[in-house]
């Protein structure tokens, strides 16, 4: 029997498992537009095949992949197809998958330029692209993180650092004990990841000053308390249910007048700024200090592509930096200065490839089409007896409700059971609702017809079984 090193070398030389992975992957892609969107019962049962003890000895590499494909592929949700409307989950473009595949072979970590010249180069290039695309202040910087949960954390860490620095308090050294107080002001519809970030940062979610919102979930400007220079005002580009946008222009002006910090959670909505016909939604967003956004939502890159943007480079770097005698900093951009992690994969490669492939007009068309699909769905479902649209459809989110909470829940479960499409539920101003998110480049008008038919059928099945 060969030793482990010899066996691994053989896998590299034979390349059979790489070919098998590609074949399995391509087989999978053949199914995603037509298959049941949620895994079948049988596929879910098949997951039992993973209930095993860690093997005592090495397993054949091909067998490992075969197990994944045989029992894993059917137990995926078809988020890549055109009828997954859950959460704000997007599909992926072929260039995103392909670039990620090539990058897998490179296995780069863009912590420092010396560790990955290509990774750090692409981060520098895309940072500038994004600053231009979002029309941000020209010295703004970007950190490439896993998602908006982390991007919110980073933006708010920069805010915390900056506000305390203004008070001659270096939070990295002195911590929060006995520090000057930071005020947090945000809308009652802020995303849960904002509350979480505030908790992690030790600012305490109990201290949040919650502002009333209107029927769409937008902060009521007149209800915002008096702000001051020790305040972080957190706004939202794209309410996770309704897709609504806060009034950035007015709110940022109010904050800027007293030197408060404004952070915008724009996980999926910030992309409205890149669309000629939708940028009225984000008017004034460039007046904020930090922004969080996901490419793996609206831009349809593979997952694990969040971005924190910050107008104050010094604040972001100071909040997240580390040092050590073995760290090699260059005069080029070192990615780890802008993120909490040191080692992380070069997710920038898929982001760069997707942006280069789409170009500005492609981004505009991709994002605007999501809005058109949402509108078409809303206009169609509203004509079906028994369904109501509860929000103004301004971007990619549609909130649908039946006559009662009970009926809404039953119909939702029936739609999920039918598996022609998938969407989740939510609570909107105390009422149970279905939330339908249009986030996939792949959604066609025909997909919407199929989805509407599924809604209709589900309602018929529920009402006729009474
Ligand atoms: C999805 C989402 C988040 C969290 O982003 P992740 O990439 O899942 O970490 C935060 N805020 C809003 C508004 C979102 O839609």
Image (cartoon, rainbow, N blue to C red):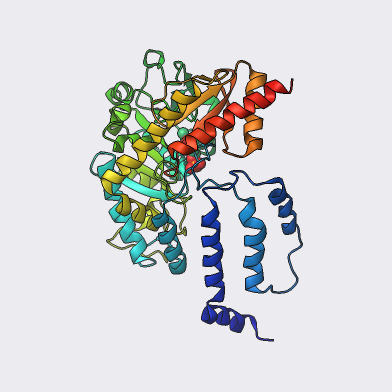
Percent position of residue 296, x then y = 44, 46
Residue 464 seen by the camera: yes
In which quarter of the view is residue 50 placed? bottom right
Q: Is residue 70 above or below residue 361?
A: below
Q: Is residue 20 left or right of residue 304?
A: right
Residue at position x 37%, y 13% in the image: 222
Residue that extends furthest to the bottom in the rendered view of this protein: 1
Q: Is residue 105 above or below residue 298?
A: below
Residue that extends furthest to the top in the rendered view of this protein: 222
Of 342 and 391, which appears nearest the observer? 391
Which quadrant is the C terminus positioned in?
Answer: top right
Residue at position x 50%, y 28% in the image: 241
Q: Is residue 314 above or below residue 432?
A: below
Residue 193 seen by the camera: no
Q: Is residue 149 left or right of residue 408?
A: left
Which quadrant is the N terminus positioned in?
Answer: bottom right
Q: Is residue 49 above or below residue 391?
A: below
Q: Is residue 108 left or right of residue 314?
A: right
Of 329 and 224, which appears nearest the observer? 224
Total numbered circles: 0
Residue at position x 67%, y 63% in the image: 67
Percent position of residue 221, x then y = 37, 16
Percent position of residue 108, x then y = 43, 65
Of 459 and 78, which appears nearest the observer? 459
Residue at position x 38%, y 65% in the image: 116
Percent position of residue 376, x then y = 42, 29
Residue that extends furthest to the left in the rendered view of this protein: 138
């Amino acid at each position: 029997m060969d030793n482990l090193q010899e066996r691994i070398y053989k896998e590299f030389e034979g390349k059979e498992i790489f070919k098998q992975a590609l074949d399995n992957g391509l087989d999978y892609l053949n199914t995603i537009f037509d298959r049941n969107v949620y895994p079948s019962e049988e596929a879910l049962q098949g997951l039992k095949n993973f209930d095993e003890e860690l093997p005592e000895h090495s397993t054949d590499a091909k067998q490992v992949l075969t197990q994944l494909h045989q029992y894993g592929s059917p137990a995926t949700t078809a988020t890549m197809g055109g009828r997954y409307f859950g959460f704000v989950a997007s599909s992926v473009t072929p260039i995103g998958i392909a670039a990620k595949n090539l990058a897998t072979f490179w296995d780069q970590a863009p912590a420092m330029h010396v560790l990955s010249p290509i990774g750090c180069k692409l981060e520098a290039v895309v940072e500038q692209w994004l600053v231009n695309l979002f029309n941000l202040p020209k010295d703004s910087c970007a950190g490439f993180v896993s998602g908006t949960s982390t991007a919110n954390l980073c933006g708010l860490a920069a805010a915390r650092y900056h506000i305390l620095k203004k008070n001659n308090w270096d939070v990295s050294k002195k911590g929060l004990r006995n520090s000057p107080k930071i005020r947090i002001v945000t809308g009652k519809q802020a995303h849960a990841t904002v509350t979480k970030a505030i908790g992690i940062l030790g600012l305490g979610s109990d201290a949040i000053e919650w502002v009333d919102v209107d029927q769409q979930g937008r902060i009521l400007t007149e209800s915002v308390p008096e702000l001051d220079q020790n305040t972080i005002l957190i706004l939202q580009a794209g309410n996770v249910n309704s897709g609504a946008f806060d009034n950035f222009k007015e709110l940022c002006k109010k904050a800027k007048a007293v030197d408060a910090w404004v952070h915008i959670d724009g996980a999926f909505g910030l992309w409205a700024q890149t669309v000629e016909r939708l940028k009225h939604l984000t008017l004034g967003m460039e007046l904020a200090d930090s922004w969080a956004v996901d490419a793996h939502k609206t831009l349809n890159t593979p997952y694990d592509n969040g971005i924190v943007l910050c107008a104050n480079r010094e604040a972001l770097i100071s909040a997240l930096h580390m040092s050590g005698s073995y760290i090699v900093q260059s005069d080029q951009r070192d990615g780890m200065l802008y993120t909490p992690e040191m080692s992380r994969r070069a997710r920038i490669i898929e982001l760069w490839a997707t942006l280069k492939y789409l170009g500005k007009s492609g981004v505009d068309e991709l994002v605007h089409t999501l809005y058109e699909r949402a509108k078409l769905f809303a206009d169609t479902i509203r004509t079906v007896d028994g369904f109501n649209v509860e929000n103004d459809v301004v971007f990619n989110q549609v909130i649908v409700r039946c006559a009662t909470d009970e009926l809404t829940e039953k119909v939702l479960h029936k739609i999920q059971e039918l598996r022609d499409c998938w969407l989740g539920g939510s609570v909107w101003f105390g009422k149970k609702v279905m939330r339908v998110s249009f986030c996939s480049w792949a959604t066609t008008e025909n997909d919407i017809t199929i989805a509407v038919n599924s809604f209709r059928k589900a309602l018929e099945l529920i009402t006729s079984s009474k």
